[in-house]
Amino acid sequence: MSENRLAVEMRGIVKRFPGVLANDRVDLDVRAGEVHALLGENGAGKSTLMNILSGLYHPDEGEIYVDGAKVTFGSPKDAIHDGIGMIHQHFMLVPVLSVAENLVLGLDEARFLLRPQKIEAEVEALSQRFNISVDPRAKIWQLSVGEQQRVEVLKMLYRGANILIMDEPTAVLTPQEVEELFHTLREMASSGKTIIFISHKLHEVLEIADRISVLRLGRMVSSGIDLEGVTKKDLARLMVGREVLFRIDRKAATPGEPILEIRNLQALDDKGLPALKGISLEVRTGEILALAGVSGNGQRELAEAVTGLREATGGSVIAQGREVTNASPSHVLEAGLSFVPEDRVGMGSVPNMNISENLALRNYRIPPIGNGWVMNLVAMREQAEKLVDEFDIATPSIETPSRLLSGGNLQKLILAREISGAPAMLVAMQPTRGLDVGATEAVHRILLEQRDEGAAILMISEDLDEIMALADRIAVIYEGQIMGEMSAEGADIEEIGLMMAGTRTAHNVKAG
Amino acid sequence: MSNYLIFITTILAAGVASGTPVLFATIGELFAERAGVINLGVEGMMLMGAVTAFLVSHTLGDPWIALLVGMIVGGLMSLLHALASITLRADQVVSGLALTFVGAGLSSVIGWSLVDVRDAPRLPALDIPLLGQIPVLGQIFFQHNVIVYLGFIMVPIAWFIINRTRPGLNMRAVGEYPAAADSVGINVFRLRYLYVFVGGLLAGLAGASLSLAITPLWIDGLTAGQGWIALGLVIFAGWGPFRAAFGSYLFGAIRRLPLDLQGAPPLPLDAHLILQDPLLSYFANMLPYLFVILVLVIASGEALRKRLGAPAALGIPYIRGERGI
Amino acid sequence: MSAQSSIAERFPYRIRIQKRLDNPRWLSILSPVVLVIGALIVGGVLLSIVGVSPFVAYSRIFRAAFGTPAGWLRGELYPLSDTTIKATPLLLAGLSVALAFRMQLWNIGAEGQLLIGAWAATGVALKLLSPDTPAFIMIPAMMLAAFLAGGLYGAVPGALKAWLGVNLIITTLMLNYVAAFWNNFFIYGPWSLRGFGLTPKFPRTAWLPRLTEFADQFSILRGLTAHAGILIGLAAAFILWYVLRKSKFGYEIKVIGDNPEAARYAGMNIKRNILLVMLISGGLAGLAGMGEVSGVIHIFQERISPGYGFTAIIVAWLAKLNPWGVVLVAYLFGGLLVGGDEIQPFGIVSMLNGVILFVVVGGELLLRYRVRIERSESVTQSAAAGGGQ
């Protein structure tokens, strides 16, 4: 088997969505048995290209060859038939079904009757062969994110995938889990499987990939470069199209008194199980406290319990000396605590209402907009004009429904709304997830400005790069508990990673 | 004592018979909802099934062909909803309502000349040998119109299909997480069409069994809200066939109560006279509807406690490439 | 996969639906018109299938509903008056539905709330107040009773929805049937006129003023029975429009209707708003019921509504839940009802209603999206590839 045999060739792929050219005459060569990284910003067209390769989308133009033979996929099933399997960022696993049921979903054998025992035995055998441990009888919703990812890998192997596409697989993992995953990927590659690894994280790409292709704004700017002599800086320039500063200019923090105090806070998750098991944190004026952790360890519940959106079953929240435990969201806001939620479309905005109405969401009750039982629509529009201008929100008009805004502009809208009242405290959850580099920089700048003006900011993020760039102090959450806290100055990623995986020793040693 | 036993046996037997149409409709809607589509058009499909079956039985004289036609008409009606809600992504609530309006109106137009027909052939009654001889239980379960036994068979079959077969697994996947199903090559649109159609067939069967066996005649609005009751029972049943059967038969018994009370045996304090008071019948007639509300309250309390719920993707049109992919 | 391929081979086209990014104003004005015309065509086809000539049916409906210009010149205004009478309950109930739907509260119970409103108004007119009560007390008292009774009848399922999460569609629908039996109990029982299915006639002071009562001043109004209920409806439309546009309450309704999570985040009290909206929604439907007994028939009987509460759903949806749109559409549908009395069988109108709603919900999307049917290269190729394997 020659080293340069091509597993996948994509030629002149074009994919249009209404108003967007997602892929513009893209070529891609992937060699058999390599780990090929597909690098690009959010929105560069990486996922679209891979969705085409995995049969989910039809390309508008272009051809695909797998192992030298031309293919056309009508569905993902056709793609897996030719050995191509994709693991999406959002796992394609049905939560109420068991691991075994998810593995056989959509397969042709066992046309009618399901024989659970038989399937479970097969799954067990497979997971032993590839050394990926999973209980086939467990329901997906009972598994951790890392375990779910393993199920996805198993699912593709079970279907005989030779070419495995992984879309941003590390976003949900601890650094140690990332190492483990990379180990598995390398092993699979050396046993002849081809891996396409989608990412926007430069250091990961440099660590795992044999070759790299870079997409920018739907175009392939650099196809299949070898790693020899390539630096992070080169890749960044290719990816963004201009020089990128890796370290944001920031002054040293001048923290003051703690004004947001969370004491032994407890809360339940949506299933009624304990999600917060006694969280204590203090955020001081003029600092950013970053809460690191793998998704699903209680971050959402914490943000909601602090901001009055979720009932606290124990403990207390004190904002500027005022007890706001289980206060209504509007009382929490009045107490000076603003909130940038994780889900910008699902919670942070009202998609079908226009920008000016969206900007009034948190202050429509109070003058000048709220005026008795009516609203001053003129004042509402004036506020919108001002904030759109000040925060540089790109929109045709303030009458545009917020659903038509790009992710970055929507986040600017939300930040503008939350910050315009000069809050003393801000809880920001995943403030830059899914944003491109430009928007990310803008959001980071806004957060630092707020800090410098004396706001106490609790930033909840899964992105360790972001945390290292912005935080003054770092706390780590795991299964609803704080594993440890440290100053960001000289913080050790390795140590944070261990805490994210639930090891407390590092902190204890440090604290002791 | 035996008077009371006879009275209660009568009520329960009537309940099993009278709950059978709503059972079909409930099971049908359960399939559609398990695949992620709410169809509020059950009432309209039942009415169309009922009137066309009655018409066919009256003109051709064969109730079995009539039953089949009623089913098919119900199925065809449901395809309108499927087209609107699956392909055209219309609001499922409004589309289903529209289907009910169409069914109610069209059945009334078709049934215009059938209102006075009394001699359309009906489905036969059938006493099951041996089982029918069992005291009390035999009378409750095994001395019925033949259509009632179809209900008995359908419940375990529905359970088996949902929980133990590949089509059932695919259906559940489509109702819970269509993007995941799509990603492994299950045709979400086709399956949703299929199960909406199955729901329509069973709603048509429900209507036909009403006009051919249970209330064997045609009047305008024959179903009297049973299609809506089926929708409520699906929720009460927690999307499972056995509880659906329990709810349907219980509903059937309550629905027949105003009639059965007329035959109430003498009770202490002359209570039977109060029960037989015609004015009380207005309140007795409310009971099935209040029963459904009560049952929904119980079910929702249960859902809150156990955090159970509807299929996760229920009522949400699937759009390839949006959210979740 | 093989079944899929064979379908694709026989029908090598696929429907592609693309969202329009712009929403031009002409489209939002044109689309209801196009959709109604489309619905009339579909309805016409259905009519001819069941053996009714659509041209005859439609022209009869139109004449009965709106008359002819020549007739108007001769002073024949009664078609317009009759249509106004039917439009009145449709307007009030339509506003009721539109308000609830704005907040994604699927109140299908306008019919029952209307019936209960009629019951309460009757109770005030016949039992609570003496027949000597002057009209300026009697009428407001009946309105208040109807509004409160209908409102409470809507608030109960509203509360069940808000606090227990009980499905509103089913509960409101069940309560429609309950309301009918409740009314019948009174109609055939305690309030019955000698055991017939109706009550005694209301005292004159409990009648809403009608056009014909001004015939002495304007002779053209003689015999026209349109009543003041339409003014109540128009006032309600104005208030609703103003509240939705300008008030905090209206803003909250819109936010909750579009994204309840965002409403929670904004600190809105969703439960209270559900209760309030269902109360007002039920109240408006209750007023519609009061209008029927007090403005039209002046007695209380079983058949006071030919399904106004259900038609109201179509009216509200066609009006895109906009109060002034409801005014317009209610009038058109009032005409359809008047015309429907002229043609047999009666179900035709109800069927047309359903068809219109169907075409509107299905067609809205067709107009909001560009739909293309194109010969699908890739599908045919994959079918060929599938065949070769």
Image (cartoon, grey):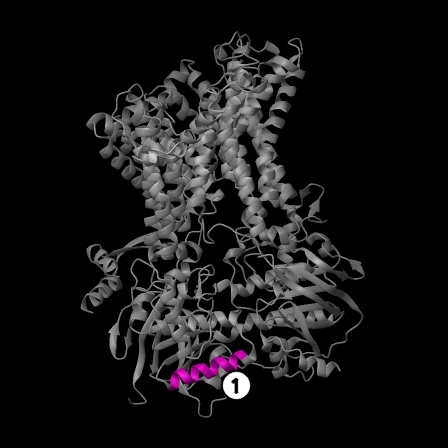
Q: Quadrant of the N terminus of chain A?
A: bottom left
Does residue A251 appear left or right of residue C284 in this picture?
Answer: right
Figure check: C62 above or below C272: above
Figure check: C221 above or below A422: above
SS of the residue under disc 1: helix
Residue A192: x and y, percent?
34, 84
Q: Give the amino acid type for the residue marked by disc 1 in the picture.
A: Lys
Q: Is residue A464 visible?
A: yes
Is C368 in front, or is B109?
B109
Residue B241: x and y, percent?
41, 45
Q: Which chain is indicated by disc 1?
A: A
Residue designated by label 1 = A233
Q: Quadrant of residue B168?
A: bottom left
Figure check: A384 above or below A38: above
Q: Residue at x 30, y 83 (%)?
A: A6
Q: Is residue C33 visible?
A: no
Does residue A251 appear left or right of residue B176 in this picture?
Answer: right
Q: Residue at x 44, y 92 (%)?
A: A228
Is C206 in front, or is C19?
C206
